[in-house]
Amino acid sequence: MKAISLTEPMAWAIFHGKDIENRTWPTKFRGRVYIHASKGFNKEHYRWICENNNRLVCGDIPFEYEFVHGAIIGEVTIVDCVQHHGSRWAMEGQWQFVLENPVLYDKSIPCKGMRKFFEPVLLCSKCGKEKREWDGLCQMCWEAYCSAEWWRTEGGLLA
Ligand SMILES: [Zn+2]
């Protein structure tokens, strides 16, 4: 499954009432995508959401330092791509990817962000290197962790 990267707080907003994604380019892609929160933070967007929350209805807005960065935080389905969408989130002059069924993950997945749609490159949360495993540590860190645990428990008992 491909991913698309957004700058916070707009990645967060997808799971709090934002029903479209504005882009300068159109897409023919329809289907499920991962939502990646990039490293950046857009203070202007943050202020705009805070000031307009009574009509945007996002619920409780996190503090700036609480947003997750550099990770996949959930997934959503792109069902259409239009211009002049009626959403309160639509930006005139841009394309709107119409979104449905957002699911925010309990646990975000560290991952590099890239332009347009991309295949996620997952990063080990311990060593920071690329990994294939979807969940947890890379194979090397996992093995190191397991053998350390073995020495701490089984190995310790034998000694
Ligand atoms: Zn690792």
Image (cartoon, helix red, strand yellow):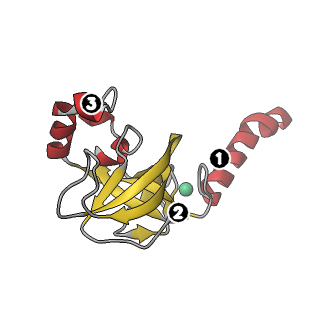
The image position of residue 155, as x and y in percent, is 79, 40
Q: Is residue 86 in sight in this rendering? A: yes
Q: Is residue 109 visible?
A: no
Give the residue displayed 46% in from the left and 59% down from the top: 78
Mark toward the start of the polypeptide (1 vs 3): 3
Residue 155 relative to residue 133: left or right: right
The residue under label 2 is 31
Q: Which numbered mark, 1 or 3, is in the foreground of this view? A: 3
State the image coordinates of residue 8 (x, y, percent, origin top left).
29, 47
Residue carrying label 1: 145
Q: Amino acid at mark 3?
A: Phe
Ligand 1 shows up in the quarter that is bottom right
Q: Mark 2–mark 1 contact, CB under 8 Å?
A: no
Looking at the rendered structure, the kind of residue marked 1 is Tyr
| Mark 2 nearby-residue class (10 Å; few <14, some 14–19, many ≥20) | some
The answer to whether mark 2 is within 8 Å of ligand 1 is: no
Disc 3 marks which residue?
A: 63
Q: Quadrant of the C terminus?
A: top right
Q: Is residue 138 left or right of residue 83?
A: right
**SS at mark 2?**
strand
Asked whether 109 or 24 is in front, the reply is 24
Q: Looking at the image, do the residues carrying marks 1 and 3 touch, with CB atoms under 8 Å apart?
A: no
Front residue of 72 and 32: 32
Residue under the image location 20 percent in, 48 percent down? 42
Question: Could you tell which of marks 2 and 1 lies nearer the N-terminus?
Answer: 2
Name which quarter of the figure residue 5 lies in. Answer: bottom left
Nearest to viewer (mark 2 / mark 1): 2
Dividing the image into 4 quarters, which one contains the N terminus? bottom right
